[in-house]
Amino acid sequence: MQHTALADQTLELHDPHSFVTKYIWSQDHKVIAIQYGLTAVFVGLVALVLSGLMRLQLGFPDTFDFITPSSYLQFVTMHGMIMVIYLLTALLLGGFGNYLIPLMVGARDMVFPYMNMLSYWMYLLSVIILMASFFVPGGPTGAGWTLYPPQAILQGTPGYDWGIILMLVSLAVFIVAFTMGGLNYVTTVLQARTRGMTLMRMPLTIWGIFTATVLGLLAFPALLVSAIMMLLDKIVGTSFFMPALVSLGENLDYTGGSPVLFQHLFWFFGHPEVYIVALPAFGMVSDVLACHARKNIFGYRMMVWAIVAIGGLSFVVWAHHMYVSGMHPAFGFFFATTTLIIAVPTAIKVYNWVLTLWRGNIHLRVPMLFAIGFIFTFIHGGLTGLFLGNVTIDLPLSDTYFVVAHFHMVMGVSPIMVLFAAIYHWYPLMTGRMLNDALGKAHFWLTFLGTYAIYLPMHYLGFLGVPRRYFAMGSTDFIPESALSLNASITVSALIVGASQLIFLFNVFWSLRHGEKAGHNPWGATSLEWQTPDVPPHHGNWGPELPTVYRWAYDFSVPGASHDFIPQNEPPDAAHPTSDEHDERGGAI
Amino acid sequence: MKLVIALVVLVVGSLLFHVLSPWWFTPLASNWHTVDTTVDITLYITGAVFVAVNLFMAWAVYRYRHRPDQRAHYEPENKRLETWLTVITAVGVAAMLAPGLVVWADFTQVPEEATPVEVVGEQWQWSYRFPGADGVLGEVASRYVGPDNPFGMSPADPAGADDILVSSNELHLPLDRPVKLLLRSKDVLHDFAVPQFRVKMDLVPGSVSFVWFTPTRTGRFDVLCMELCGIAHYAMRGQVVVDTQDDFDTWLGSQSTWADISSQPAGDPDAGRLAYATCSACHGPEGEGNPAMNAPALAGLETWYLERQLRYYQQGVRGAHEQDNLGAQMAAMAATVAAGSAMRNLTAYIASLPAADSDATVEGDPHRGAAHFNTCGACHGRLGQGNHALQAPRLAGQQDWYLKRQLENFRRGIRGTHGDDNFGHQMVLMARSLQNEQSIDDLLAYVNTL
Amino acid sequence: MSLFSTLREKPWEPQPQPAVPGPAVAADPMSTARTALRFIMAIVSVLFFLFIITFLSRSQYPDFQALAGQPWQPFTDTSRLWFNTALLGGSSLAMHWAVMSARREQLNHAVLGVSLGVFFAIAFLLAQLDLWQRLSALGYYVNSNPANSYFYLLTAVHGLHLLGGMVVLANILFRVWYDDSLASLSGPLSLCAQYWHFLLAVWLVLFALLASSPGTINALAALCGF
């Protein structure tokens, strides 16, 4: 714990020299962030391919020989788990959290750099364990990403043997990795802010990441508890979650356990997990919107309060995932009420984003396109949440494609729109080069319109009553033939969206060498990360002296100022029209 | 500019899609019209918000797009505006929540007069139990479950004797009478869902959950399992038939009670030997089957499967499809077997014949077939030995050309599509996961190795 | 409440500027470590809280047989548990003494205190292992009853946390030794001691729960709404 941030006077001593210490066993938060990012994107691509395979089966049933009912369920499970945990959580917190926290609060590094490095390597280990389950006998688990017992560990479910064990072990390792990283994030935010950076001067990105990390630290233990207890049920034969049952004609030795108990634990983690993904996205999109609209974020205080309120409330809504789980129906009243209450702070955030655009000076650059795309998809996904959160409406809609469409809209597409906005926005800082604009726009349009073409129709399959996690619909008395063509069109859209991500990947690698040079602060941003002496920032971030903060992060278009932005570290008297410091830095656009 | 147009087009397009969509709730068949009303209220409120916020955003993006010499307005916050928006949102949320809670209160209170009916779920089929004349469901427990007691009826509880056991995926219910379904699972989580009734509930092993409704129109409705329950989750289908009271009473009267079933004597193989003489002409003296006569092996099959198939042939559930010529031959033969003890004796004799391997006629790659057999083995057993609990017959030792023909019959809907074929529809779905002849040959090559 | 007044600040309004001139300085290692420790204790508390909640919920199923209450049940006689508790308490006391000595710069006493603390902690773990073996020998296997499962599970998780604490302690001692900066021992050591006291408190809660009679457990469960 003593390897605290670099002491200010001895910068050179800590500089890594060899390739290995600089890029592999690195303790620099920026390198760790990029390691996290690349690993997460890699597993994300695996999950993307899996979703393509699922869509092929659903859109064109009875066509593909290599997709069996077992492998279909395995694709569903691995796609879900990878996307939620190993891509979104890891990329938003491990990637962007790592990169942005020290830079935005004015620290030289995370407070425990060694633990930060360990965090990444544990994460990589968890990914390797997870990927290994594709190669063990029986393949990965096909129990659905919720891993509900008893079926997750019984015959009759694919991967009930090795697959589920590896999945649970991988999750436990991931939780350890997340806890090590998360301790760093919260401690850095609380203890390593530079002088003048009061809590309320922090950019909303930091508020989002900080609150999400606190949620993660307190919610992941629930997943750990359930993973440990299910592992014991599977391996040692305890009966925590396993009732007396007859599996495929065979009486097993389990007695008296409660499968619903697992669901409570799982969703006590699982619902905050939604906000672990959403809150950093909320924060980052706020900063992107403010910067490209050249306007302060509307209602900053309300935004902070909303983040904190959502974070708190997210711990008392979990059982809205369980209205039809067979728990006592009286719980429905409580959880429907808390769930709909959480809609109020969330709606306020949406209003404030839109009101930030109102009377702004909107530059429709690629990050801004993605940010506005996010507002649209998030409104859609948030509103459908009001259907499912309302216990009565959940009766016909739960476990149908409406649920699938809802959660993909709200915690799939929306955070990914923010991730893209964030990558287009901060790529110049990370690499010193701009991403190609034309490719970026093509990527935006295909992704934005394509995902809407996937998920809007999917809601209507749900209204119709089409169940999720079905390998094939076969024939029923209520699903018309036309639903099949709808499914085919969804598949085509999904494949187009999937393929269009290649444009993005190409752009990222091509621009690394051929992109336009970004220079200092190309967007004219106010927050600290753009005010480093070098772009990309060097090890230690700030050169000889830490910055001092004099103002909040949203001094855009301040009346009377010479530029339409004033960086946080600009002293009050330097902001007067006579100052020309910023022309030297080539800041304004 | 393009973005503004896109936003407006998406909003208008979503509305049009909603209005023109042929995909909407199925026509209601229960008393839960209040659920539909709640959905409508939420739909109108959220729809209005969707249109208003997005159009405002599109307008803002258009009106405040960057132009030279333009500067954004500086306004950190606007308390009045934010307070108003909060209040309006809270009112809208309350307007959606209140009706939801009222309807949920109805859902949690089952009417006194509701008839209890037990629904039993297991991988991957449904069965049902009525309380019988005494109106009380007898005690059940997991430890009593066995081949002869699939419901796990307690032998000690006299209340169980008159319980009516429906070992079929098809449940009949009377029209306009509230019914309380008691949901019980023998193995994993399932979910009893009929889209037309709107309500659904999970079946949780180890406890009994419930759902109640009043059917309001006659007809046949699909029951779908809506909680992931393993490989054949998608094939776990059943049916609810809503009858008039008279039709319902007739149907219920034709079902057997636990007392009937448990007192049925076992078949006598010796008594069945004579009757088998007719069968042996085609199926062979040892039940080994005969490719030349298109007769599959019978040795190794168990009584419950043989009886069910004979009954299906007799009732036209199997062998009645116009393209099933060979099945028609068998249907004619099956008609000569009298139901009851004669059939039990015959099947008992056949079941006593020793299982033997048959000669391979198809060529395929058993290694690739093993991957396909993963799915089959879930029900038919890892060694293809069959599983009574899942109603899955033995496959090992069966003539491969016969299995191939049956798989094709299932795929083409020649077998398994009759409304009364309780287990055939699963095989239809399963057989369709094999996309071509090569896969079937590979699979059978593997089955031949078992 | 300072948190509420912080959250009500209006950051866009002019605020008092940093008073001290000169360069900003990096964070203080001790206060960061203290913050991190508080979070760790919060996380571990949540972990055990959830285990205990599931314990109480599970205890309401008919197959649950508490380990105490009837004369033949192993924890009706709690003397063994008290013995183990004394070992852990001794460890905690020794750590406390070590911190006090380090603060008074009596390094010999501090080293002795830490050694005693580690000795008692290891003794506690061995005693717990011995308890496991006795229970197994009596036929209380991990999978024969959920109460047994919880006993093994909770003691194992608690023991692992104690082991983790010892690894960190070893790391601290090694570095202090290596840097020859024995004088700076008291800060990190006091954090370790806090963690030790915390684990003692956790153990006391577990002890109370595991040695409760069915009546107490049922009352607790009823209190939690199960």
Image: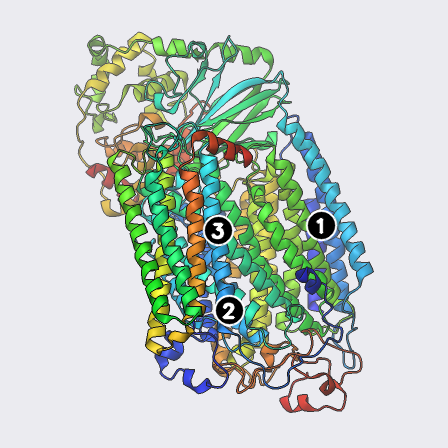
Q: Secondary structure at mark 1?
A: helix
Name the spot of residue C166 as percent of width and height, x first: 35, 60
- Determine whether A236 is above or below B315 in the image: below
Q: Chain letter of disc 1?
A: B
Label 2, label 1: how many angstroms apart (C-alpha)?
Answer: 54 Å
* Residue A522 placement, left or right of B260: right
Give the numbered dot on residue B15: 1
Which residue of the protein is positioned furthest toward the right in this rendering? B80
- Determine whether B215 is above or below A63 in the image: above
| Amino acid found under the numbered disc labelled 1 | Leu
Q: Chain letter of disc 3?
A: C
The disc, 2 or 3, on the residue closer to the chain's N-terminal end is: 2
Colour convention: rainbow
Read off the residue under disc 3: C45
Give the foreground label among 3 and 1: 3
Name the spot of residue A77 as percent of width and height, x first: 43, 49
Residues tagged by mark 3 and mark 1 found on one chain of the structure:
no
Q: How many marks?
A: 3
